[in-house]
Image (cartoon, rainbow, N blue to C red):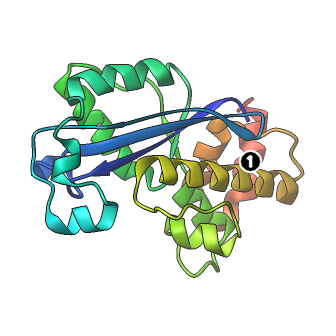
């Protein structure tokens, strides 16, 4: 697989359309089967973090008071990512917040997301559930003591993605799995993954 950027956001809630904002972002770069670099920052979007979110993430209102604003973090984040393909666990969540924060500074995302949660649902249908922490435990992947912090979750997602790619290679006899192929697989019904891969190979994906 080509070099990828695995991203994770912590936020004040579930939807930017409801006024929720980011409180932390982290990205790890994966190349050659390992994590090679990372970027992380708390973010002060000048919104209140609800108590239950403080309890969940450990990110408090006091912690973000001295953090940089989104208008400073987002350009630095996108410069770090460049044009690398993106990966997230439950990518629909992270992509919504990334797009919303970029729109505030009049920028747009250039690349697509692959979703490790959708891929795991297809490759590990009998897993207890497909939450990141559960999959990490189920697959005996490197774990973090602090879940729901952006860098820890991005690292765990990176290890999960490497496991998923290895699983696809072994199961379907492939030597290379591209980001575009992953995006095709995550949309395919479980019974049609083989056909999806064959089409991807024929189209050069």
* Residue at horizontal 27 percent and vertical 20 percent from the top: 107
Mark 1 residue element: helix
Q: Is residue 164 above or below residue 23?
A: below
* Residue at horizontal 70 percent and vertical 36 percent from the top: 178
Task: Say which residue label 1 marks.
Answer: 197
The quadrant of the rendering that contains the N terminus is: top right
Q: Position of residue 77 (x, y in %)?
A: 40, 26
Residues 130 and 192: in front is 130
Q: Position of residue 45 (x, y in %)?
A: 16, 38
Q: Is residue 39 above or below residue 170?
A: above
Q: Is residue 124 above or below residue 59?
A: below
Q: Position of residue 73 (x, y in %)?
A: 30, 26
Q: Quadrant of residue 147?
A: bottom left
Residues 95 and 13: in front is 13
* Residue at horizontal 15 percent and vertical 55 percent from the top: 49
In the image: residue 104, left or right of residue 116: left
Residues 54 and 109: in front is 54
The quadrant of the rendering that contains the C terminus is: top right
Q: Quadrant of residue 201?
A: top right
Q: Position of residue 187 (x, y in %)?
A: 55, 53
Q: Is residue 47 above or below residue 86?
A: below
* Residue at horizontal 87 percent and vertical 56 percent from the top: 170
How many numbered circles does the render carry?
1
- Please rate how many residues cluster around mark 1, counting C-alpha atoms within 10 Å: few if below 14, some from 14 to 19, many from 20: many
């Amino acid at each position: 697989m080509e070099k990828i950027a695995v991203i994770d956001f912590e936020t004040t809630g579930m939807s930017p359309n409801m006024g929720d904002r980011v409180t932390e972002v982290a990205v790890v770069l994966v190349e050659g089967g390992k994590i090679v670099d990372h970027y992380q920052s708390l973010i002060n979007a000048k919104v209140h973090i609800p108590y239950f979110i403080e309890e969940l993430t450990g990110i408090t209102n006091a912690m973000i008071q001295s953090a940089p604003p989104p208008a400073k973090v987002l350009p630095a984040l996108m410069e770090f990512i460049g044009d690398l393909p993106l990966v997230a666990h439950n990518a629909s969540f992270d992509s919504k917040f990334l797009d919303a924060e970029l729109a505030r500074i009049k920028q747009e995302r250039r690349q697509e997301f692959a979703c490790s949660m959708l891929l795991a649902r297809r490759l590990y249908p009998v897993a207890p559930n497909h939450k990141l922490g559960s999959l990490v435990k189920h697959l005996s992947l490197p774990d973090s003591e602090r879940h729901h912090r952006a860098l820890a979750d991005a690292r765990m997602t990176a290890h999960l993605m490497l496991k998923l790619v290895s699983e696809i290679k072994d199961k379907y006899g492939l030597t290379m799995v591209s980001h575009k192929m992953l995006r095709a697989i995550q949309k395919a019904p479980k019974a049609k993954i083989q056909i999806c891969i064959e089409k991807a190979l024929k189209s050069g994906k």
